Image: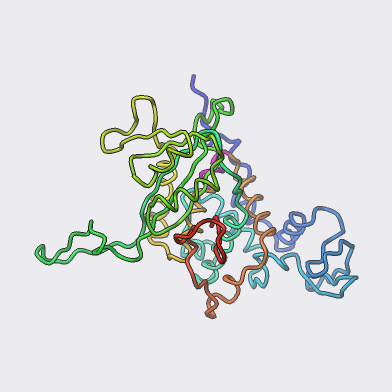
């Protein structure tokens, strides 16, 4: 008899929306405090770093540092700093976001929480920002699948056939078209379990203008360990990797799976989730935040075998470990991100002024 899949079992459901919604704002505050500083009375001043039983101001739920007299809260210095919603809303939003396995729109989040679209939009992007800032970027190893897919930049055809352009040509394509490159480290056979066989263990996603040998080579050198076996399709952007890594290729114009078993199924699995998030939830992505959405899909793929309670705590911990980000303070007052989060923008990794790896 086949064993029940983990995601269908009761073991995968350790925290429900009903439980989170039953929390008071005081209980949500205590949860934040425990996750950030533990269960003891000592807290850390984000200004001077002194660990002490600082003076607590219960009416304001704030502390005053005994060393520098700085007044701070449990969210000071984190991605949640300067928040205006109650702690309960942040906690509930994280649980709703956790359970949305194919992503969630800000409009839906606003309806579930009973807040404005603007508040839900910024809150969800704070969660995404923490995921990409805190993601693990150590080199992938073992067996890695690599693939790219294009998003955005749809060119609407003209009404009359004689007026339509060949949208396959570069000069007729939109400048808003972007490529998402994904690298997935496969699960070793010894780590597989009967309830969830196969699959990938870790995923890294990147955004750039198009699949090209220079950017693919630079990303592979930094994020794939030497000696790693790479599986890729027939795209010529991966041709130069043959001189750097053991390579296996599959020609998707002829077959989905090569005779020797080579395939890109795990990379395709990632894009399957990403497309469902795009088509079924968000409908489109702003270019400046495309990397955050791509990383969200990667995070959901990598945590698919964890309980929703574990994912909930992990996201909150990442948020509390992420420093206050200027892009999400005063967003609707005009303080918005100015540039896209491209991988390398055609420059080598580590060059001046480059945000490598994001």
Please determine whether, in this image, residue 47 is positioned above or below residue 291.
below
Residue at image coords 39%, 59%: 209
The spot of residue 124 in percent (x, y) is 54, 62
Given the current orientation, which residue lies at the most extreme left position? Answer: 162
User: Nearest the camera: 252 or 330?
Assistant: 252
User: Nearest the camera: 181 or 109?
Assistant: 181
Residue at image coords 34%, 45%: 236
Residue at image coords 64%, 45%: 310
Residue at image coords 48%, 63%: 289
Magenta stretch contains residue 182: no
Given the current orientation, which residue lies at the most extreme top position? Answer: 1
Lateral position of residue 32 relative to residue 307, left or right: right
Lateral position of residue 57 relative to residue 112, left or right: right
- Magenta-tinted stretch: 300-305
User: Nearest the camera: 234 or 39?
Assistant: 234
Residue 49 image-quadrant placement? bottom right
Residue 248 image-quadrant placement? top left
The spot of residue 339 in percent (x, y) is 49, 69
The spot of residue 200 in percent (x, y) is 51, 37
Specify the color scheme: rainbow
The spot of residue 72 in percent (x, y) is 78, 71
Lateral position of residue 253 relative to residue 58, left or right: left
């Amino acid at each position: 008899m086949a064993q029940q899949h983990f995601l269908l079992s009761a073991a995968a459901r350790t925290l429900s929306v009903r439980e989170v919604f039953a929390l008071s704002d005081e209980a949500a505050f205590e949860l934040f405090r425990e996750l950030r500083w533990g269960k003891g009375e000592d807290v850390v001043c984000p200004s001077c770093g002194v660990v002490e039983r600082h003076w607590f101001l219960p009416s304001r739920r704030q502390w005053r540092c005994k060393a520098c007299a700085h007044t701070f809260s449990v969210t000071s210095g984190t991605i949640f700093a300067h928040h205006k919603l109650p702690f309960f809303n942040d906690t509930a939003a994280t649980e709703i976001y956790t359970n949305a396995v194919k992503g969630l729109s800000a409009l839906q989040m606003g309806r579930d929480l009973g807040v404005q679209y603007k508040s839900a939009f910024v809150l969800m992007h704070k969660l995404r920002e923490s995921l990409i800032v805190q993601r693990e970027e150590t080199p992938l190893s073992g067996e890695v699948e690599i693939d790219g897919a294009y998003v955005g930049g749809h060119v609407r055809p003209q009404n009359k056939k004689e007026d339509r352009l060949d949208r396959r040509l570069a000069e007729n394509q939109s400048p808003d078209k972007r490529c998402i490159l994904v690298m997935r480290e496969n699960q070793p056979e010894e780590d597989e379990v009967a309830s969830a066989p196969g699959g990938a263990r870790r995923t890294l996603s990147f955004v750039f203008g198009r699949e090209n040998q220079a950017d693919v080579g630079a990303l592979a050198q930094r994020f794939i360990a030497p000696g790693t076996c790479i599986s890729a399709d027939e795209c010529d952007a991966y041709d130069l990797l043959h001189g750097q890594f053991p390579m296996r290729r599959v020609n998707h114009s002829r077959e989905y799976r090569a005779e020797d078993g080579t395939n890109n199924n795990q990379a395709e699995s990632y894009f399957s989730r990403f497309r469902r998030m795009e088509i079924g939830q968000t409908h489109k992505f702003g270019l400046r935040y495309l990397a955050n959405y791509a990383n969200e899909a990667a995070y959901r793929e990598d945590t698919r075998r964890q309980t929703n309670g574990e994912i909930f705590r992990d996201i909150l911990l990442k948020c509390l470990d992420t420093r206050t980000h200027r892009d999400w303070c005063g967003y609707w007052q005009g303080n918005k991100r100015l540039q896209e989060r491209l991988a390398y923008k055609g420059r080598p990794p580590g060059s001046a002024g480059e945000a490598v790896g994001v």
